[in-house]
Image (cartoon, rainbow, N blue to C red):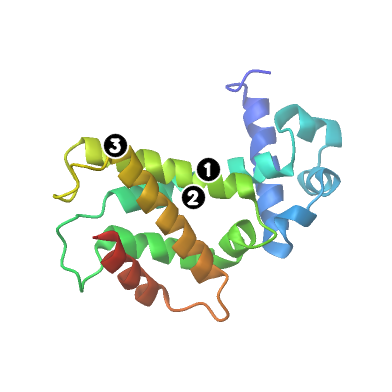
Amino acid sequence: MKADDPRVRRTRARLRTAVLTLAAEKDVGAITVSEVARCAGVNRATVYLHFPDVDALVTDAMEEAVTQVARAAALCPRDAPRDRTPEPLTVLFGHVAAAAPLYRRMLGPQGSALFAVRMRERLTAELAGRFAGGHRAGGLDDVPAETHAAYLAGALTGVIAHWVTGDPPAPAEEVALAFWRLFRT
């Protein structure tokens, strides 16, 4: 199977759309391969040809969203004022708020561990790259940049998970500002 084959791309797109549609309706752990196949209009074997399981499929389907979150976090200017959320962080939390039901399902108790790990890894990579480019707060020379990036990535993933599973979730602007104040340390 060639990834650049238009039929493969179309099938994978249909599978991604199907699993995200189902994830908007029910917990990820409750979605079956049969449901995905039926929703995508393919047979079960086709699903398995492309993905080993539903968790891998849903993580792949959320890759663009994870990339958007990671880039926004990495673009935050470290020297922005403490009481003003930087634009990239406002965009990031706005994006999560707009897709809160999906993030709630992905990061909640019955969510996808693979998705949470992928999100944390992408955040770590983006932040480490930014730090390598000299965009790191001073006074942290005794902490490896990769460790610092992993710390912040874990914190952001945890804050997003806590926020979207809250009842009711706090306003995005409030959480973004609180995270920014913590992020700067």
Does residue 181 appear to the left or right of 79 in the view shown?
right
Name which residue lies at 60% across and 40% down.
Answer: 60
Q: Secondary structure at mark 3?
A: helix
Q: Nearer the viewer, residue 168 or 35?
A: 168
Residue topped by disc 3 = 129
Residue topped by disc 2 = 65
The answer to whether residue 27 is seen in the rendering is: yes
Q: Amino acid at mark 1?
A: Arg
Q: How many neighbours does mark 3 have within 10 angstroms: few (below 14), some (14-19), or many (20 or more)?
A: some
Q: Secondary structure at mark 2?
A: helix
Q: Quadrant of the C terminus?
A: bottom left
Mark earlier in primary sequence (1, 2): 2
Mark 1 vs mark 2: in front: 1
142 lies above or below 103: above
Q: Amino acid at mark 3?
A: Gly
Residue 5 lies in what quarter of the image? top right
